[in-house]
């Protein structure tokens, strides 16, 4: 597995893969990897990528003031071991100055999809995400890039950016990998201890209740979202940020009963801000 820290080195690797006729898969991450990240590497390979490159970069531009940029967990050695075991061919691990050199001033803004939901409480988030992902695409030159449905609004922002900017990369969505008790895997679960860790299950419990209602035939998005919201609100250690039913494609509000909806929740539990979602459609739920 090759490790690159400078954009030019990574681009040279990508150029060589393309010249040899190989299909490149890219898996952008902020590190402190877990099984969810590993699944993205596997999915890239299953999607016919000959070489999969992962990137590890805790991107400062997507954190707002007072958020967890400084304390975001980092463990480079462990991450590299996991990526090697997962069969990644290359890892791009730039420093902040490699991505944002002195005088940096160019940003990508995906206007509408970035608003609402997480965009309300984290106004810098999706501008930072879109900017860094656009840059990573120019450095890794992937044919395919894999993103987790766990960050559903992020996935919608990236899909919109790819369409709007005519980026020549196929975006693949990967299902959310969960702990045995339902909690969606996240690097930020590291912040949860003891009772907070147990309380964190309320997000997935709310979503699974929503799924059951849908499977029983309920199609009213307001009622389904309210049921998920009530589960989170009943957990005294959790502070609900939002629980909403949205159109799975546009993330716009739903105006009436629907056979397809995504339920998205965000809540603070102790020191962690957690998000989760589930998509319900025609007799099934993912
Ligand atoms: P992060 O390092 O948290 O920025 O995540 C990097 C990529 O992994 C993003 O595409 C995430 O959506 C994805 N991801 C994070 N957690 C999970 C999970 N539990 N299951 C599947 N993908 C995930």
Image (tube, rainbow, N blue to C red):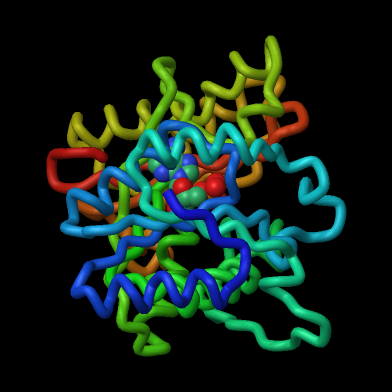
Q: Going 65% across and 27% down the picture, which residue do you hit?
A: 190
Please indicate, yes or no, whether residue 235 appears anywhere in the rendered image: yes
Q: Quadrant of residue 196?
A: top right
The image shows residue 172 at horizontal and vertical percentages of 28, 60
| Residue 234 falls left or right of residue 69 | left
The image shows residue 98 at horizontal and vertical percentages of 69, 71
Between 230 and 4, the one lying in front of the other is 4
| Residue 167 falls left or right of residue 65 | left
Residue positioned most to the right: 66
Between 269 and 255, the one lying in front of the other is 269
Q: Going 76% across and 71% down the picture, which residue do you hit?
A: 97
Q: Quadrant of residue 269?
A: top right
* Location of residue 67 with respect to 6 vertically, above or below: above
Residue positioned most to the top: 194
* Location of residue 125 with respect to 139 vertically, above or below: above
* Location of residue 96 with respect to 267 vertically, above or below: below
Please indicate, yes or no, whether residue 267 appears anywhere in the rendered image: no
The image shows residue 95 at horizontal and vertical percentages of 71, 62
For the C terminus, give its image quadrant. top left
| Residue 167 falls left or right of residue 226 | left
Between 211 and 129, the one lying in front of the other is 129
Q: Going 22% across and 59% down the picture, which residue do you hit?
A: 49
| Residue 286 falls left or right of residue 35 | left
Number of marks in the rendered image: 0
């Amino acid at each position: 597995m090759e490790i690159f820290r400078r954009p030019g080195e990574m681009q040279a690797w990508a150029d060589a893969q393309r010249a040899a006729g190989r299909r490149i898969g890219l898996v952008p991450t902020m590190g402190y990897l877990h099984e969810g990240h590993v699944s993205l590497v596997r999915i890239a390979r299953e999607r016919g990528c000959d070489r999969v490159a992962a990137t590890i970069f805790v991107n400062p531009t997507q954190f707002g003031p007072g958020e967890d940029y400084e304390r975001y967990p980092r463990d480079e050695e462990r991450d590299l071991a996991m990526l090697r075991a997962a069969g990644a061919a290359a890892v791009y691990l730039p420093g902040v100055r490699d991505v944002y050199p002195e005088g940096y001033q160019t940003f990508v803004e995906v206007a509408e999809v970035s608003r609402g939901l997480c965009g309300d409480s984290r106004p810098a988030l999706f501008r930072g995400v879109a900017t860094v992902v656009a840059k990573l695409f120019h450095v890794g030159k992937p044919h395919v890039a894999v993103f987790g449905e766990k960050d559903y609004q992020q996935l919608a922002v990236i899909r919109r950016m790819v369409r709007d900017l005519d980026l020549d990369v196929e975006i693949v969505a990967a299902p959310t990998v969960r702990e045995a008790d339902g909690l969606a895997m996240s690097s930020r679960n590291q912040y949860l201890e003891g009772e907070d860790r147990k309380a964190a299950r309320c997000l997935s419990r709310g979503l699974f209740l929503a799924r059951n209602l849908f499977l029983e035939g309920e199609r009213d998005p307001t009622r389904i979202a309210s049921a998920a919201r009530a589960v989170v609100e009943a957990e005294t250690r959790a502070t609900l940020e939002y629980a909403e039913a949205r159109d799975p494609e546009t993330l716009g509000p739903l105006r009436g009963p629907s056979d397809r909806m995504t339920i998205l929740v965000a809540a603070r539990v102790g020191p962690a801000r957690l998000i989760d979602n589930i998509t319900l459609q025609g007799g099934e739920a993912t």
